[in-house]
Amino acid sequence: MTFWKLFARNRSAVMGLVIIFLIIFMALTAPLFFPADPFSLAGQPMSPPGENGFLLGSDSLGRDVAAGIAHGAKTSLLIGLLATLVAVFVGVIMGALAGYYGGFIDNLLMRATEMFQTIPSFIFAILLVAIMKPSIESIVIAIAVVSWPAVARLVRGEFLSLRGREFVQACHTIGMNDIRIMLAEMLPNCLSPIIVIGSLMVATAILIESGLAFLGLGDPNIMSWGFQVGAGRTLLRSAWWVCTFPGIAILLTVLAINLVGEGLNDALNPRLRERT
Amino acid sequence: MTRLLDIRDLHVALPAGGQRAHAVKAADLHLEENEILCVVGESGSGKSLTARAVMGLLPKPHVHISQGEVMFQGEDLAKASEARMRQIRGSDISMIFQEPMTALNPVMTIGNQIDEVFRFHENMPGKERRARALKLLEDVQLPDPEQTLDAYPHQLSGGQRQRAMIAMALALDPKILIADEPTTALDVTTQAQVLKLIKEMQAEHGTGVLFITHDFGVVADIADRVAVMQNGLVVETGTTEEVLRNPQHPYTQGLMAAVPSLTPRAARARSDESVLSVNKLVKTYSSGGGLFGGKARVVHAAKEVTFDLARGETLGIVGESGSGKSTVARCIVRLNDAEAGEIMLGDTDLRPLGRSAMRAHRSKIQMVFQDPFASLNPRTKVGKIIAQGPLLYGASPEEARARALELLEIVGLDDRAYDRFPHEFSGGQRQRIGIARALALEPQILVADEPVSALDVSIQAQILELLDSIRDRMNLSMVFITHDLRVAAQVCDRIAVMRRGEVVEIGATEGIFANPQHEYTRDLLSAVPGKGWFASETAAAAG
């Protein structure tokens, strides 16, 4: 069965994929539909949805909520993807080295990993951003720093079990060097779980970014959903739309990514393939 | 004699879209009181599923009985409800499995697990239950039954666990005992003891035993009647005498002929030139101890192991699990680092060489692995798996490809295999690919670690033949690790017998078989199942 067929058996995963494509489309077309700066004061403040030319209303300063969501989509997706890529890269290297060499190197790297895991990840991210000054780069770095330990632990476990497999030992006996064994022989065999955990991490990264922006630790020059929710929270009772629509955007994106991640897990995990 | 079990026209359906529609097709079998019926066949013959169908333990709904009946005391078990089957299981029909470690609950004591059987099926005060459990453990000849009752499964050896399983299965004096490869995971000496026990218990209780096995030696030792299965069909049934002495069906004849004989084959001249000499090799494993130290447990896997390998010779290293035979093999190819001793390959001692210094010598010693399913990277094409070695040693891609194709032909696979993935091949074919990979570097020495023990007996014979012809053709020397003395008799020129890390005896195969010096060697030889039943062994049987 092809990969796509396996994936498509999970209806909700396909649904999630459709939502993700819509959000990507929205992020790409934001400058076309909302050419103005999303921070600009576009008209009457506190307009309810549908009035004064605002599709989803405006906030206390008269900024267009719909424009903010469209432009914010790019921020959320970009940060989610970048942070995950960095975290997976670091996590795979650490986990692979620890799992492959074992012994002292394993002990050293895993104790380091545990140190990162003892600090609650969101508080750690706040701390890092506060130290580095809020900007896109510092947010990406902060999210990557709190996310890589999970990848490292996963990859270490996979490498530990692969290390003892006979095909890896056969590579030793023909004199292949360690880096080649790790990259060409072992890594392809644990790609599936890495892809799955990576896809789920994108969702977590988006949540962390929104949380940071909500607390005012986002990049002040870039529109994001978390920033919108944060800006509207004091008006929740008088102008519900300011918080609600960006909140729904976060919810939908994270849900869609989780569904896709779940679908990938079903499709890539051979043990679940027989499940009907 | 009364008929206990009557299986008529049994069909077990497999999920749609598989290779076959039925795992078992139109099987007719019956089991009498006080007899042992062996169902024998190779992997995929449907023998295990037949047993599971009787127990109502098929992995439903994918695999189910589609037709036929399983009559037990006037009742059709194929149609019995799950609740009824629960009553029957354990009390009327019970089962023992291949791997007692996974069949027993690791977090419950043996006593509690036996107790469970009584509690589910009978109303009995606790004291009496304990007394009955104690009696059972005595019956299966476990040492110190009192203590075993309070032991956890991991505290017992494999043989003891299987005895405990048997005790549990016989707790309620069932009419039928189903044994699914109960001795396959055990060492040969333990296997002999467990077989003897099953036979004794069966005779004492008059139980009917349905014994599933792939091993004709075991059949010869234990069966009253035999049913041979092939691809879901029962191809032959009869008494042990009839089937083994005078097999009618060509498949049975083929299987019987494939069982390696215990009579060593004729000795070959031994070359004076030594290619490998291992001197006082020492390897210990330690486990436990963490970041901050702690007490580590030390196991001596090889204690001053010494042997020579002559050019063109095959040296067998035989022994039971934990004897250190695999460790020695892995030390020679430097997958493990030995602590002391010498591994002389020509004039170089391989033991102290570092990783990069070793690389220059790697090509001279190559290894064939045990498990044909784990030894090939599932994501790499067969051609690349074989060509990889020559490429690493500087062959051009064209040369490597030509070499790989040539090797595929030598090991009896056709060119199309080059571009396919390992999962498209059967176990025997995969083992051929593994051998081709090992040969790709044109080694002088081939170390084969149980290369045929994961294969069916007919495939096993083909692979052994292949190894033999390759050895002669390429003038290879071979170190052949095996637990199976039958295989050793057919392949090895000399044999080293190992026990607990020590070589207790070494010598020419014929000499060892005819006149074993060490007591342990004699134990091993006498435990080999089915002596005297197979081709060209009749002479040996007399002695």
Image: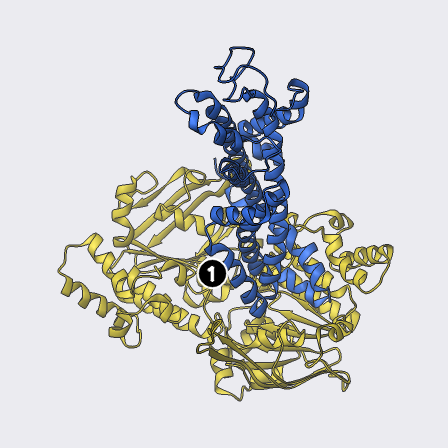
Chain colours: A blue, B yellow
* Camera sees residue A253: no
Q: Is residue B304 visible?
A: yes
Q: Is residue B50 left or right of residue B339?
A: left
Q: Residue at label 1?
A: B242
- From what the image shows, is residue A54 above or below residue A109? above
Q: Quadrant of residue A133?
A: top right
Please name whichever residue, A143 or B270, is drawn nearer the observer in this view of the structure.
A143
Instruction: State the residue in front, A232 or A113.
Output: A232
- Amino acid type for the residue under numbered disc 1: Glu
Instruction: Please report, as a chain letter, where disc 1 is located.
Output: B
Of residues A121 and B24, the one drawn nearer to the viewer in this rendering = A121
Q: Write down the quadrant of residue B128 in the picture.
A: bottom left
SS at circle 1: helix
- Residue B336 rendering spot, x and y as whole percentages: 62, 74
- Label 1 crowd (10 A; few <14 / some 14-19 / many >=20): few
Residue A139's place in the image compared with B108, above or below, is above
